[in-house]
Amino acid sequence: MKIKKLLIANRGEISLRIIKSVKEMGIQTVAVFSEADRNSPHVLAADEAICIGPAPASESYLRMDKIIQAAKDLQADAIHPGYGFLSENAEFAEKVVAAGITFVGPSSDSIALMGSKLEAKKAVSAYDIPLVPGTDEPIQRVELAKHIAAEIGYPILIKASAGGGGKGMRIVQDEQEFDAQMERATSEAQSAFGDPAVFIEKYIESPKHIEIQLLGDQHGNMVYLFERECSIQRRHQKVIEEAPSPVLTPEIRKKMGEAAILVGKSCGYYGAGTVEFLVDKNLDFYFLEMNTRLQVEHPVTECITGLDLVKEQIKIAEGARLSISQENLQIHGHAIEARIYAEDPENQFLPDTGTLITYTPPKGPGIRVDDGFEEGMPIPIHYDPMIAKLTVHAETRELAIEKMKQALVDFKISGIKTTIPFCHYVMTHPQFTSGAFTTKFVENYFEPSKLQPVLSSEEMLVMAAFAVYWKEEQGYTSSHQLSQPFENASKSSWKTRKIR
Ligand code: ADP
Ligand code: ADP
Ligand code: MG
């Protein structure tokens, strides 16, 4: 059945991104917003908008009752949950369906199964899919768990079964640390996810995180839209993603794609979903978890496949059959996404707060910016500190890296610290450009003291001219004393500039 009016149960860039795609399909849109987001672009972009409560997410974007009531009041016949918030909440999906509204996503049973990392591993173990060695039940007796940990071999990872967003994980280096870390992990799991269940996994020392995008319809057809390499992370959460991976061979790509489809089949999956794997240096891969929603980094997959994943989600929710087949899918070029967070990379990526005094995103062929803010807007402290996603698409990885570097230089944000200088640092680092990087990149190769302010050639010219002016004032001669970056700037143009 065709969807006529869609309520987007989310905020910021993802809400705006969904609104844009579905409007092209002739679908009416309803935005929801908290009191902190009254003037947000996603609210203005929708055909209708409705306030669902005060700023804290627990009183607005996480309120299932208010969201479903809003859909009823405005006669929306479908709800898209975006990512984060209620997107992986099985109870929400169930309530939406019970209210006679289409849920744009998988069944509530698939969400419940994959929402528990332990249940997911159990479901998958019936198939020939490699798993990270570990316990398959929640830890009840610490002594037994220690015994298993010794068998697996330290270091190990204690993980929250209900975990997400990189939270609820504790590395244990040796047996002495076990009790203390176990206690922390359990209480963290309880407070962050309302579920104290934790389990043990072998800590893979220096893996790559590579995930497979799936698309399945409600008639049992499923395809994989290749991989995304997401190893550049801080706090176990991604900052830079790319497609395709610089290291996979076509054979391993196919093997991982087919394994991901088995994971999807193990939970009767339909919709867009992502199967995450850890990959070691021998390119052996291990199932990590499945995310039963649209992923933050889905734009890189859209770039290399030419598909609009939101439109595909809508068609699947309407009951249509997939219009694509595995044989017809091809990788076109290379795409890289940089997540621009309001965080200070010089200070352990701690969130920064403030107002976007300047906000000018880059433009140009092969450049895509997904954002939900405008110049002058404050970044609310209540939500995830992501400001924008910058995605570039080019013919080769090398060209994509060059395009990304320039786009980062052209991305002008002031008033708030961002991950822009960090992303630029990564693009110029030989470990990244070689493709050999792992999830340990930040720990092993990131030197905050080497971060450079990311300046455009225009800004460098102005600075160079100032430097010349200043040096002449001081009695120095002229331009040949300028340091490296300035020397690269075109001298003929700065000579003609008047700076006072
Ligand atoms: P992805 O897995 O799509 O790459 P993230 O891991 O960054 O993206 O998570 C997606 C979004 O959902 C982020 O905004 C993150 O903060 C949020 N998120 C994910 N899982 C949880 C959770 N269990 N509780 C709260 N927020 C979460
Ligand atoms: P989340 O639900 O928070 O996304 P994941 O299980 O997907 O949790 O793990 C997030 C990240 O933590 C991975 O991308 C990886 O960097 C790291 N990680 C998770 N499990 C392991 C492991 N067993 N060994 C090494 N690193 C791991
Ligand atoms: Mg994950």
Image (cartoon, rainbow, N blue to C red):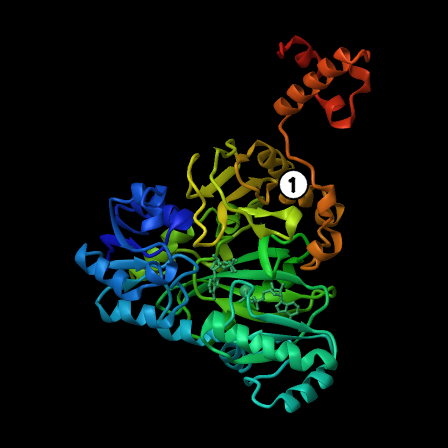
In this rendering, the answer to whether 27 lies above or below 474 is: below
Residue pictured at 60% horizontal, 41% vertical: 420
Quadrant placement of the C terminus: top right
In this rendering, the answer to whether 324 lies above or below 109 is: above
* Callout 1 secondary element: helix
146 left or right, relative to 419? right
Quadrant placement of the N terminus: bottom left
The picture places residue 153, in percent across and down from the top left corner, at 74, 80
Residue pictured at 72% horizontal, 86% vertical: 151
Q: How many marks?
A: 1
Residues 78 and 175: in front is 175
In this rendering, the answer to whether 326 lies above or below 483 is: below
Q: Quadrant of residue 466?
A: top right
The picture places residue 491, in percent across and down from the top left corner, at 72, 15
The picture places residue 309, in percent across and down from the top left corner, at 42, 53
405 left or right, relative to 82? right
Residue type at mark 1 is: His
Quick one: which residue is furthest to the front in this view?
474
Q: Is residue 88 visible?
A: yes
Q: Is residue 104 visible?
A: no
Q: Quadrant of residue 90?
A: bottom left
Residue at numbered disc 1: 424
